[in-house]
Image: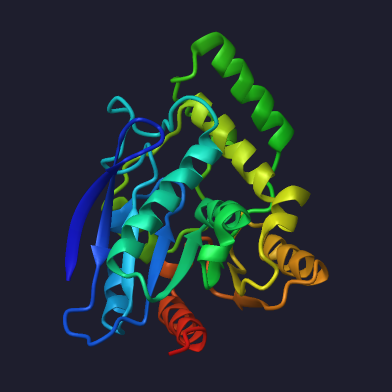
Amino acid sequence: MKREDTMTSALKTTVHYSIYEPTIVLRIKAVVIVVHDLGENRHNYEHFANALSRQGYVVVVPDLVGHGESLVNFERGYFGDGDISQAIIKDYFKLQNIMIRKYPDTFYFMLGSGVGSNIALLYASKYGDYLSGLMLLSPIRHFSHLTLRKLLTRMQIRFKGMHYHSKNRLLKLRPTHESGVVVKRRDQFNDHFTYASKALEDIYQLVERTNSVETLQNIPHHLPMLFAGGKKDAMTHFLADNKWLCHLYQQEGFEEIRCKSYMQSGHHLLFDVEREDIYKDLLDYLNEHIYY
Protein backbone atom coordinates (compact mmCIF):
# COMPACT_ATOMS: atom_id res chain seq x y z
CA MET A 1 0.00 0.00 0.00
CA LYS A 2 1.39 3.37 -1.03
CA ARG A 3 0.59 6.72 0.48
CA GLU A 4 1.97 10.23 0.02
CA ASP A 5 2.80 12.88 2.59
CA THR A 6 4.81 16.09 2.99
CA MET A 7 6.98 17.84 5.56
CA THR A 8 8.73 21.19 5.81
CA SER A 9 12.43 21.10 4.92
CA ALA A 10 15.22 22.88 6.78
CA LEU A 11 15.69 24.61 3.40
CA LYS A 12 12.30 26.34 3.79
CA THR A 13 10.36 24.36 1.21
CA THR A 14 7.99 21.40 1.18
CA VAL A 15 9.46 17.92 0.83
CA HIS A 16 7.23 15.21 -0.65
CA TYR A 17 7.74 11.60 0.36
CA SER A 18 6.16 8.24 -0.44
CA ILE A 19 5.54 5.49 2.11
CA TYR A 20 5.10 1.87 1.02
CA GLU A 21 3.57 -0.39 3.67
CA PRO A 22 2.70 -4.10 3.66
CA THR A 23 -1.02 -4.63 3.08
CA ILE A 24 -1.44 -7.54 5.50
CA VAL A 25 1.17 -8.16 8.19
CA LEU A 26 1.03 -8.80 11.93
CA ARG A 27 4.35 -7.08 12.55
CA ILE A 28 6.55 -5.20 10.12
CA LYS A 29 10.14 -6.40 9.82
CA ALA A 30 11.83 -2.98 9.61
CA VAL A 31 11.68 0.48 8.05
CA VAL A 32 13.98 1.24 5.11
CA ILE A 33 14.71 4.90 4.31
CA VAL A 34 15.85 5.41 0.70
CA VAL A 35 18.09 8.28 -0.42
CA HIS A 36 17.85 8.66 -4.19
CA ASP A 37 20.66 9.61 -6.58
CA LEU A 38 21.30 12.75 -8.61
CA GLY A 39 18.80 13.47 -11.37
CA GLU A 40 16.19 11.20 -9.80
CA ASN A 41 13.17 11.52 -7.53
CA ARG A 42 11.14 9.32 -5.21
CA HIS A 43 9.02 7.82 -8.01
CA ASN A 44 12.02 6.05 -9.55
CA TYR A 45 12.08 3.65 -6.59
CA GLU A 46 8.45 2.54 -6.66
CA HIS A 47 9.23 -0.89 -8.11
CA PHE A 48 11.95 -1.58 -5.54
CA ALA A 49 9.86 -0.23 -2.65
CA ASN A 50 6.88 -2.38 -3.63
CA ALA A 51 9.12 -5.45 -3.78
CA LEU A 52 10.36 -4.85 -0.22
CA SER A 53 6.91 -4.02 1.15
CA ARG A 54 5.60 -7.36 -0.13
CA GLN A 55 8.23 -8.98 2.09
CA GLY A 56 7.04 -7.19 5.24
CA TYR A 57 9.14 -4.01 5.13
CA VAL A 58 8.00 -0.41 5.29
CA VAL A 59 9.87 1.73 2.75
CA VAL A 60 9.92 5.53 2.80
CA VAL A 61 11.34 7.46 -0.17
CA PRO A 62 11.53 11.27 -0.01
CA ASP A 63 12.52 13.65 -2.77
CA LEU A 64 15.77 15.46 -2.21
CA VAL A 65 15.13 19.19 -2.24
CA GLY A 66 15.38 20.42 -5.84
CA HIS A 67 14.07 17.12 -7.22
CA GLY A 68 10.63 15.78 -8.09
CA GLU A 69 7.94 17.99 -6.60
CA SER A 70 10.13 19.25 -3.74
CA LEU A 71 11.42 22.45 -5.31
CA VAL A 72 12.78 25.74 -3.97
CA ASN A 73 10.84 28.53 -5.70
CA PHE A 74 9.80 26.03 -8.41
CA GLU A 75 13.43 25.54 -9.53
CA ARG A 76 14.56 22.04 -10.32
CA GLY A 77 18.22 21.23 -9.70
CA TYR A 78 18.72 23.85 -6.96
CA PHE A 79 19.02 22.92 -3.28
CA GLY A 80 18.83 26.37 -1.72
CA ASP A 81 21.12 28.68 0.23
CA GLY A 82 23.51 27.98 3.08
CA ASP A 83 25.05 24.70 4.26
CA ILE A 84 23.17 22.20 2.13
CA SER A 85 24.77 19.06 3.57
CA GLN A 86 23.64 19.81 7.10
CA ALA A 87 20.15 20.84 5.97
CA ILE A 88 19.67 17.58 4.06
CA ILE A 89 20.82 15.57 7.09
CA LYS A 90 18.34 17.45 9.28
CA ASP A 91 15.55 16.64 6.82
CA TYR A 92 16.28 12.92 6.95
CA PHE A 93 16.43 12.96 10.74
CA LYS A 94 13.08 14.73 10.82
CA LEU A 95 11.65 12.12 8.46
CA GLN A 96 13.00 9.26 10.57
CA ASN A 97 11.39 10.77 13.65
CA ILE A 98 8.07 11.00 11.79
CA MET A 99 8.36 7.28 11.01
CA ILE A 100 9.44 6.42 14.57
CA ARG A 101 6.24 7.94 15.91
CA LYS A 102 4.25 5.42 13.87
CA TYR A 103 6.71 2.51 14.06
CA PRO A 104 8.55 2.96 17.38
CA ASP A 105 9.63 -0.60 18.11
CA THR A 106 11.41 -1.73 14.97
CA PHE A 107 14.70 -1.54 13.08
CA TYR A 108 15.68 1.34 10.80
CA PHE A 109 17.94 0.92 7.79
CA MET A 110 19.11 3.48 5.26
CA LEU A 111 19.75 2.70 1.59
CA GLY A 112 21.50 5.19 -0.67
CA SER A 113 22.16 5.15 -4.40
CA GLY A 114 25.06 7.10 -5.93
CA VAL A 115 25.38 10.45 -4.17
CA GLY A 116 22.48 9.22 -2.04
CA SER A 117 25.00 6.76 -0.54
CA ASN A 118 27.28 9.66 0.31
CA ILE A 119 24.36 11.39 2.03
CA ALA A 120 23.64 8.18 3.95
CA LEU A 121 27.24 8.09 5.21
CA LEU A 122 27.01 11.72 6.32
CA TYR A 123 23.74 10.91 8.07
CA ALA A 124 25.34 7.96 9.85
CA SER A 125 28.19 10.18 11.05
CA LYS A 126 25.66 12.21 13.04
CA TYR A 127 22.72 9.88 13.65
CA GLY A 128 24.21 6.42 13.13
CA ASP A 129 23.03 5.23 16.54
CA TYR A 130 19.46 5.48 15.23
CA LEU A 131 20.19 2.98 12.43
CA SER A 132 20.60 -0.79 12.28
CA GLY A 133 22.51 -0.82 9.00
CA LEU A 134 23.54 0.99 5.82
CA MET A 135 23.21 -0.27 2.24
CA LEU A 136 25.41 1.85 -0.03
CA LEU A 137 24.96 1.39 -3.77
CA SER A 138 27.58 3.02 -6.02
CA PRO A 139 29.01 5.46 -3.44
CA ILE A 140 31.33 8.07 -4.95
CA ARG A 141 34.86 8.57 -3.64
CA HIS A 142 35.58 11.58 -5.85
CA PHE A 143 34.53 13.08 -9.18
CA SER A 144 36.94 12.92 -12.12
CA HIS A 145 38.58 16.25 -13.05
CA LEU A 146 37.29 17.73 -9.79
CA THR A 147 39.71 20.69 -9.71
CA LEU A 148 38.67 21.76 -13.21
CA ARG A 149 35.00 21.17 -12.41
CA LYS A 150 35.27 23.42 -9.36
CA LEU A 151 37.03 26.15 -11.32
CA LEU A 152 34.40 26.14 -14.09
CA THR A 153 31.58 26.14 -11.56
CA ARG A 154 33.03 29.06 -9.61
CA MET A 155 33.47 31.04 -12.82
CA GLN A 156 29.86 30.39 -13.75
CA ILE A 157 28.66 31.51 -10.32
CA ARG A 158 30.73 34.68 -10.60
CA PHE A 159 29.72 35.65 -14.12
CA LYS A 160 26.29 34.05 -14.59
CA GLY A 161 24.96 33.65 -11.07
CA MET A 162 24.11 30.81 -8.68
CA HIS A 163 21.01 29.78 -10.62
CA TYR A 164 22.70 29.29 -14.00
CA HIS A 165 22.18 25.81 -15.46
CA SER A 166 25.18 24.84 -17.57
CA LYS A 167 25.12 22.33 -20.43
CA ASN A 168 28.92 21.94 -20.37
CA ARG A 169 29.65 18.23 -20.83
CA LEU A 170 32.46 18.33 -18.26
CA LEU A 171 29.94 19.33 -15.59
CA LYS A 172 27.59 16.49 -16.47
CA LEU A 173 26.89 14.25 -13.48
CA ARG A 174 25.10 11.39 -15.23
CA PRO A 175 26.85 8.06 -15.83
CA THR A 176 28.29 7.15 -19.21
CA HIS A 177 26.97 3.56 -19.18
CA GLU A 178 23.22 3.16 -18.99
CA SER A 179 21.49 0.03 -20.22
CA GLY A 180 18.18 0.23 -22.05
CA VAL A 181 16.12 -0.61 -18.97
CA VAL A 182 17.92 2.11 -16.96
CA VAL A 183 17.22 4.75 -19.59
CA LYS A 184 13.59 3.66 -19.87
CA ARG A 185 12.91 3.79 -16.14
CA ARG A 186 14.82 7.01 -15.49
CA ASP A 187 13.33 8.92 -18.42
CA GLN A 188 9.80 8.14 -17.23
CA PHE A 189 10.42 10.78 -14.58
CA ASN A 190 13.48 12.84 -15.59
CA ASP A 191 13.96 14.76 -18.80
CA HIS A 192 17.35 16.44 -19.42
CA PHE A 193 17.99 17.12 -15.73
CA THR A 194 20.64 19.81 -15.07
CA TYR A 195 21.88 21.45 -11.89
CA ALA A 196 22.29 25.11 -11.01
CA SER A 197 25.89 26.24 -10.52
CA LYS A 198 25.37 26.62 -6.76
CA ALA A 199 23.96 23.08 -6.60
CA LEU A 200 27.01 21.67 -8.40
CA GLU A 201 29.25 23.34 -5.84
CA ASP A 202 27.08 21.88 -3.06
CA ILE A 203 27.42 18.38 -4.54
CA TYR A 204 31.22 18.61 -4.76
CA GLN A 205 31.42 19.76 -1.13
CA LEU A 206 29.05 17.02 0.02
CA VAL A 207 31.11 14.24 -1.58
CA GLU A 208 34.35 15.67 -0.17
CA ARG A 209 32.82 15.94 3.30
CA THR A 210 31.57 12.36 3.09
CA ASN A 211 35.07 11.03 2.51
CA SER A 212 36.75 13.14 5.19
CA VAL A 213 38.52 11.66 8.21
CA GLU A 214 35.99 13.39 10.48
CA THR A 215 33.03 11.62 8.85
CA LEU A 216 34.82 8.27 8.94
CA GLN A 217 35.62 8.56 12.64
CA ASN A 218 32.16 9.81 13.64
CA ILE A 219 30.24 6.85 12.19
CA PRO A 220 29.55 4.26 14.93
CA HIS A 221 31.99 1.44 14.29
CA HIS A 222 29.41 -1.18 15.26
CA LEU A 223 27.06 -0.11 12.43
CA PRO A 224 26.87 -2.82 9.72
CA MET A 225 27.52 -1.55 6.19
CA LEU A 226 27.10 -3.08 2.76
CA PHE A 227 28.99 -1.49 -0.16
CA ALA A 228 27.84 -2.48 -3.66
CA GLY A 229 29.14 -1.39 -7.05
CA GLY A 230 28.90 -2.12 -10.76
CA LYS A 231 31.87 -3.06 -12.92
CA LYS A 232 30.61 -0.83 -15.77
CA ASP A 233 30.17 2.26 -13.60
CA ALA A 234 32.49 5.03 -14.79
CA MET A 235 31.29 7.40 -12.05
CA THR A 236 32.81 5.14 -9.41
CA HIS A 237 35.81 4.35 -11.62
CA PHE A 238 34.75 0.81 -12.52
CA LEU A 239 34.58 -0.59 -8.95
CA ALA A 240 37.78 1.19 -7.83
CA ASP A 241 35.84 3.54 -5.52
CA ASN A 242 33.84 0.67 -4.05
CA LYS A 243 36.93 -1.40 -3.31
CA TRP A 244 38.82 1.58 -1.90
CA LEU A 245 35.97 2.54 0.45
CA CYS A 246 35.49 -1.05 1.63
CA HIS A 247 39.19 -1.35 2.42
CA LEU A 248 39.21 2.04 4.16
CA TYR A 249 36.34 1.14 6.49
CA GLN A 250 37.77 -2.31 7.18
CA GLN A 251 41.15 -0.80 8.04
CA GLU A 252 39.46 1.72 10.33
CA GLY A 253 38.17 -1.18 12.43
CA PHE A 254 34.45 -1.25 11.61
CA GLU A 255 32.94 -4.46 12.91
CA GLU A 256 31.03 -5.50 9.78
CA ILE A 257 31.83 -4.27 6.27
CA ARG A 258 30.60 -6.26 3.28
CA CYS A 259 31.44 -5.64 -0.36
CA LYS A 260 29.47 -6.78 -3.39
CA SER A 261 30.39 -6.40 -7.06
CA TYR A 262 28.06 -6.77 -10.04
CA MET A 263 30.03 -7.39 -13.19
CA GLN A 264 27.30 -6.64 -15.77
CA SER A 265 25.88 -3.49 -14.15
CA GLY A 266 26.62 0.22 -14.28
CA HIS A 267 25.88 3.01 -11.81
CA HIS A 268 22.14 2.44 -11.31
CA LEU A 269 22.22 -1.01 -9.76
CA LEU A 270 18.53 -1.20 -8.86
CA PHE A 271 17.51 -0.60 -12.48
CA ASP A 272 20.20 -2.48 -14.40
CA VAL A 273 20.39 -5.98 -15.86
CA GLU A 274 21.31 -7.68 -12.56
CA ARG A 275 18.56 -5.95 -10.58
CA GLU A 276 16.85 -9.21 -9.58
CA ASP A 277 20.10 -10.46 -8.04
CA ILE A 278 20.55 -7.13 -6.27
CA TYR A 279 16.99 -7.18 -4.93
CA LYS A 280 17.61 -10.65 -3.51
CA ASP A 281 20.97 -9.69 -2.01
CA LEU A 282 19.50 -6.61 -0.32
CA LEU A 283 16.53 -8.57 1.02
CA ASP A 284 18.84 -11.27 2.37
CA TYR A 285 20.99 -8.60 4.00
CA LEU A 286 17.98 -7.01 5.68
CA ASN A 287 16.57 -10.33 6.87
CA GLU A 288 19.93 -11.23 8.35
CA HIS A 289 20.12 -8.03 10.39
CA ILE A 290 16.72 -8.04 12.07
CA TYR A 291 16.30 -9.82 15.39
CA TYR A 292 12.96 -10.50 17.09
Whether 39 is drawn above or below 198: the answer is below
Q: Which residue sits at x=49%, y=19%?
A: 162
Q: Which residue sits at x=49%, y=59%?
A: 113
Measured as percent of width and height from the top left, residue 156 is found at: 56, 17
The quarter of the image holding the C terminus is: bottom left
Whether 223 is drawn above or below 268: the answer is below
Position of 175 with respect to 193 (left or right) is right
The quarter holding residue 25 reads bottom left
Q: Which residue sits at x=75%, y=57%?
A: 217
Q: Which residue sits at x=59%, y=68%?
A: 229
Whether 265 is drawn above or below 43: the answer is below
The quarter of the image holding the N terminus is: bottom left
Residue 121: tell me if it is visible.
Answer: yes
Q: Residue furthest top?
A: 159
Measured as percent of width and height from the top left, residue 194 is found at: 42, 34
Position of 246 with respect to 6 (left or right) is right
Position of 70 with respect to 130 (left or right) is left
Which one is in front, 251 or 182? 251
Measured as percent of width and height from the top left, residue 77 is found at: 40, 34
Whether 104 is drawn above or below 116: the answer is below
Which one is in front, 108 or 201? 108
Measured as percent of width and height from the top left, residue 98 is found at: 32, 56
